[in-house]
C-alpha cells in the first residue's frame, strides 16, 4: 500500500504534486485495521449517541472479540436483544453515551446483557457505498 502524507491545514488549496515522495507500507488495510481476524466482526453505527468519541451515523465499526473490555472502553453489547455501541462504565455498571443529549443506561440484574466486543477502529465513508446499501 502506498501512503501519501496529506497535512490538513487552514487555507489548503490543493494537494502536493503527484510526483511527491510517498511511503511504501508492506501491509494491507486488513492488516492495518484488524488485529485478530478470527475474532473480529464489522458493524455499522446508527444514531448520534457516540459522536463525541468520533463515531457518527453510518460509520463502520471494527469490533474485536479477542480483546478483554476495560473500564471506559467503547464496546458493542447486546442489551435486551438490541445491539448498542456505548462506553462501558464497569465501576458503576452502566453504559455511557458520548453525547450529552443521551443519558447513561444502568445495567440492571434483570437485563439480558452481554458484551459482544471492543470497538478497535471506526471508519467514516465520505461517499455512499453500494456494498453498505447506501446508493
Image: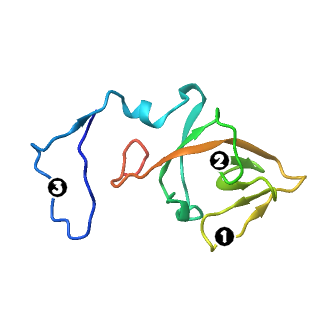
Foreground: disc 3 or disc 1: 3
Image quadrant where residue 72 sits:
bottom right
Q: Earlier in the sequence, mark 3 or mark 1?
A: 3
Image quadrant where residue 48 sits:
bottom right
Is 119 left, or right, of 124 in this rendering? right
- Towards the viewer: 72 or 118: 72
Q: Which residue is mark 2?
A: 76
The label on residue 102 is 1
Q: Give the Cα separation between the discs numbered 2 and 3.
A: 37 Å
- For the N terminus, the image quarter is top left
- Seen as rendered, the residue at the extreme bottom is 101
Q: Earlier in the sequence, mark 2 or mark 1?
A: 2
Q: Secondary structure at mark 2?
A: strand
The label on residue 15 is 3
Q: Secondary structure at mark 3?
A: loop
Q: Give the Cα separation between the discs numbered 3 and 1.
A: 39 Å
The answer to whether residue 93 is above or below residue 35 is below
Answer few, some or many: residues within 10 Å of disc 1's Cα (few below 14, many 20 plus, some between 14 and 19): few
Q: Give the Cα separation between the discs numbered 2 and 1.
A: 17 Å
Foreground: disc 2 or disc 3: 3
Answer few, some or many: residues within 10 Å of disc 2's Cα (few below 14, many 20 plus, some between 14 and 19): many
- Towards the viewer: 107 or 90: 90
Q: In the rendering, at what x and y percent does residue 53 appear?
A: 54, 60
Q: Secondary structure at mark 1?
A: loop
Tag count in the figure?
Answer: 3
Amino acid at each position: 500500500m502506498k501512503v501519501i502524507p496529506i497535512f490538513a491545514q487552514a487555507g489548503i488549496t490543493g494537494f502536493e504534486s503527484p510526483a511527491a515522495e510517498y511511503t511504501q507500507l508492506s501491509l494491507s488495510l486488513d492488516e492495518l485495521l484488524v488485529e485478530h481476524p478470527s475474532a473480529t466482526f464489522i458493524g455499522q453505527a446508527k444514531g448520534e449517541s457516540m459522536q463525541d468519541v468520533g463515531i457518527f451515523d453510518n460509520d463502520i465499526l471494527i469490533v474485536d472479540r479477542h480483546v478483554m473490555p476495560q473500564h471506559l472502553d467503547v464496546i458493542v453489547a447486546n442489551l435486551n436483544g438490541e445491539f448498542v455501541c456505548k462506553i462501558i462504565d464497569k465501576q458503576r455498571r452502566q453504559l455511557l453515551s458520548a453525547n450529552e443529549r443521551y443519558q447513561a443506561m444502568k445495567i440492571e440484574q434483570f437485563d439480558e446483557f452481554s458484551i459482544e466486543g471492543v470497538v478497535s477502529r471506526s471508519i467514516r465513508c465520505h461517499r455512499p457505498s453500494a456494498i453498505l446499501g447506501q446508493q
